[in-house]
Structure formats: structure tokens, C-alpha cells
Image (spheres, helix red, strand yellow):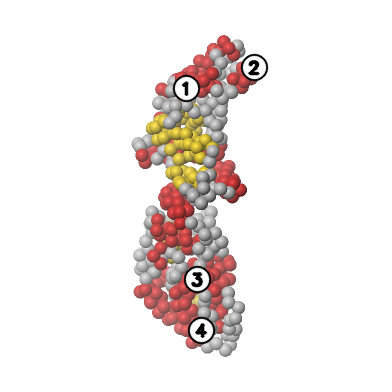
Amino acid sequence: MPTNVPAFDIQVTSKDEVVQDSILLAEELWQLASMAHGPHGQFIVVQANKDCGDAFIITSSAKRILDHIKLKSPMGTLVAQFVQSHINQCHDGGLFCIMLASSYATIRPLPSSTAIIHTTNCIVIRLLRSVHNVLQGIPKHRLVSGTYISSPRTASTSRMYIGFRLALDWTLDELDGIQENDLDWSDHDAIVAVLRGILSAKHVAAVPDAAMAMLVHMFVHHIPWLLEHPTVPPLVRVVVSRPQLPHLTDHMILHHTVLIPGYRHVTHLPLRHVTVALFNVTIRPTTTPTSDIEVTIKVDSGTYHSVMTPSAAGVLQEAELTGWATVATRLQACGVQMVLSQKKIPAFLAARLNDLGIASVERLSIQHLDAVQAVTGAAVLSDWMATDVTAADLGKVDHAYALELGGVEYVALTCDPASHETNEVSYARTRPMSTIKMDCIDDMAFEELNHVLQVREMASWLGG
């Protein structure tokens, strides 16, 4: 706020001065606000929800607008201080406060999840006249205090109006006959303009165009699902890739793709258009003595192609081997071509799956289970016996392949639900999943970013 401002004295300021200064200040606020970033000069707001009470996404221009106001009158001082106090209360709703203060634009609830109001010159003229007429009919002390003012909508009732309620009512009256249009969330240019309006005045304003375009592309991909599920955080992962030259970066987004890092036993890669089963257990199919479990642990060395035979193990019962063979045969009969397991797959089952040509990926960990389900649409099975498995419990993978990024080997699973026919139950389990490949030479910065993402994701999982 500018420091040298005229003092305000209600005793020496005439009513005509108050009215005229209010209108002039409103015009100036409108001119400054209309230069704020936004698609095609329009102002975009998103409705509040139960997780976010602040509904306004164009936020960073308010302070700059107030800094540029020509405060040549006592009324300007009063209104500027009034707006400044509401900016502090509304946090990131600053620009919206400016709009209300100028009585030219506002938001009202819409049936849809988004709202956008298009303001034209004719509306501005109508509002100017409306504001002037209403101001003329309000006593000076009430005009200044903004309290106990009769609403134009309820002229017979005297009600208390704190803050910008009066401006809100004026604007709603004028906009009753105006048609609202929902924001087209597929309009990349419009969303880029909104993001630039938010980021331009912040300390992280030096966002390169390539990164901005990448984030918008990801936002557009996720927004239809998020509008239907506003309380569920998006599934977005970040993996690091070391650029060969510091000045060369190649960020990339992989949609409908989950990358599983580290060593996992996988066979028969790459694969295309396969049916998958997803497990989160390591339950043995039969009850066996403790000594058998100890022997199995020794056998589970990770080299499943050289699994010990029953005669070599010496203690494993034939019934157990038959049980694992039955599990593998049942999965094959269901059309399963890949088995994904949150934990370790028992060695003899993995060997049998390999013999039947069924690929296996194990040790997904809890961090990847939800992402795998989001991509494949597979139900999480909790019984290796799979006695009740149906087609509705299985998922699909368009492409499973090995990928190396930044010296780390990944198993990449990709599936676009729209690319093939799937049953309704499996499709309901899918959701947008994006993996960002980020070229980063700063290990500390990347680890900090990845930590924040993982903690947020884990908190969401535990809370769900």
C-alpha cells in the first residue's frame, strides 16, 4: 500500500464527494483488474468444496492492483484499506475482492463444478448506472460504514451487510439475465493463461514454457475425473532422469503408465495386450510344518528358474506342489497372462507360472498397488487359491516393457481404458494415472519433491 495517502474525515467529506469518489475508484479498480492474467481477458473462478473453502484461483494480482491505485481522495484511502483487510481475510481470494469492490464481477453458485462469468462493456455500463443510483439513495454514514443497508433485492427489509455483501447483491441483480458459460477444461491456451496469472507474481515465476505446457497437459488429462471426485488427490508420480548435458532437459509425461522401480522378477517381456491378476498376499495353499516354511525361505533366492525339486528339498510335500500347480492352472484357465503381486510370489508358484508362459511381477509395495490398479482396472485379490476369480476381477495391460531412466531399471505398465473394450466393473476401478519423467541434475531438489509426493500419497491412502 502507498504510504502517502490523504486522511479521511467523514465530517468534512460531502455526500457527493463520497458517491463520486466511489464511482471513480470503482472505474480505476476495474481497469486495473481487467489487465490481470486470464483467458481472453476474462476472470475465472472455481467453486469451493468441502476440502478447500477458497474458491478463487486468480489470486496474485490483488496486491499489485492496490499498489497502483491513485489514492487522491479520502474515499480512495478508506476503500483501499477496506479491500486490503478483506484480502488478508480471504487469503488467496484477493483479486476476487477487487472485483467485488469495483462492483463489476462476481461469482454465484452453478449446478456444475466450475463457473465463469463473461463481463462485457454493456454489463459494465449497466452496473455503473446501478451503483450510482443505489449510492444516491443511501445516507452518507451508512454508505461509508457499509452496515445496515437495505438490499436492492429486499428493499423492504433492513439487513446488516458486512464486507462486500452489498456489492454482491448489486452484481447478482444485474447478472440475473446473463447467461453463464462453463469453462472448457480442454482449452490449453485458456488454462495456461490462468496458471500464468497465478504464478506470475509469486517467487517461482521463472517457470519455463516447456514445464508450464507439460503441467497444463497433465492437468487437462486429470480434470474430468477430479471434477467427479473432488476429494480424491490425483495419481501423479515423478521419476528422475539425469540429462547428459546440464543445459539439455527433456521432460515427458507418460499417461496411463505406472513405473515399478528396482529389481522385480519378470519373465516374457515385452508383452502387449495381456490380461492381469493383482494379488496382495503370500498365502501358502496348504497347511505345512514350520520346517517347510524355513526351507521355502532358503529356496526363495530370487532365481526361480533353478527352483529345487521336491526330492532336492527333502521336506516339501507333494500336496503343496500340487496346490501351487492348481493355482497356476486356474489362473491360466481364466486367461491370465501376467500376475502382479504386492509381496513376494512363492517360489514354486512363480516357477509354475513361468512354465505356463505367465509373466510375474512381485514386490510392488503399497506405494504402487493403487497406481497399478488405476492403470489395469484389476481387483486386488487376497487369496492365492483364486477359487472365485471371474473376468470382472481381472485387468488389462496394453504394453508391459522394461525401461531404464537415470540408471534405474523400471517395469513399465501402460493401459489406456479407452483403447479397448472392458467390462463395466473393471473400468470403474480405473482412473487417470500419470508419470512425469523429469530431467534433474539436483539430487537434493528432486528428493525433496519426491518425498512430498510420497508422503501426501501415503496419507491419502491411509485416510481412505
Asked if residue 147 can be seen in this view, the reply is: no
Residue ID at (51%, 67%): 61
Residue pointed to by mark 4: 18
Q: CA distance from mark 1 to mark 4?
A: 85 Å
Q: Residue 291: which numbered mark, if any?
A: 2
Residue ID at (38%, 54%): 186
Q: CA distance from mark 2 to mark 3?
A: 75 Å
Q: Secondary structure at mark 1?
A: helix
Q: Amino acid at mark 2?
A: Ser
Q: Earlier in the sequence, mark 2 or mark 3?
A: 3
84 up-or-down from 462: above or below: below
Q: Residue 210: which numbered mark, if any?
A: none
Task: Report x, y in % for residue 37.
Answer: 45, 65
Q: CA distance from mark 3 to mark 4?
A: 19 Å
Q: Earlier in the sequence, mark 1 or mark 2?
A: 2
Residue pointed to by mark 1: 354
Q: Residue 98: which numbered mark, if any?
A: 3
Q: Secondary structure at mark 4?
A: helix
Q: Amino acid at mark 4?
A: Val
Q: Earlier in the sequence, mark 2 or mark 4?
A: 4
Q: CA distance from mark 3 to mark 1?
A: 66 Å
Left or right placement of residue 111 versus residue 307 in this view? left
Q: Secondary structure at mark 2?
A: helix
Q: Earlier in the sequence, mark 1 or mark 4?
A: 4
Task: Select label 2 or label 4 by which is in front.
Answer: 2
456 up-or-down from 83: above or below: above
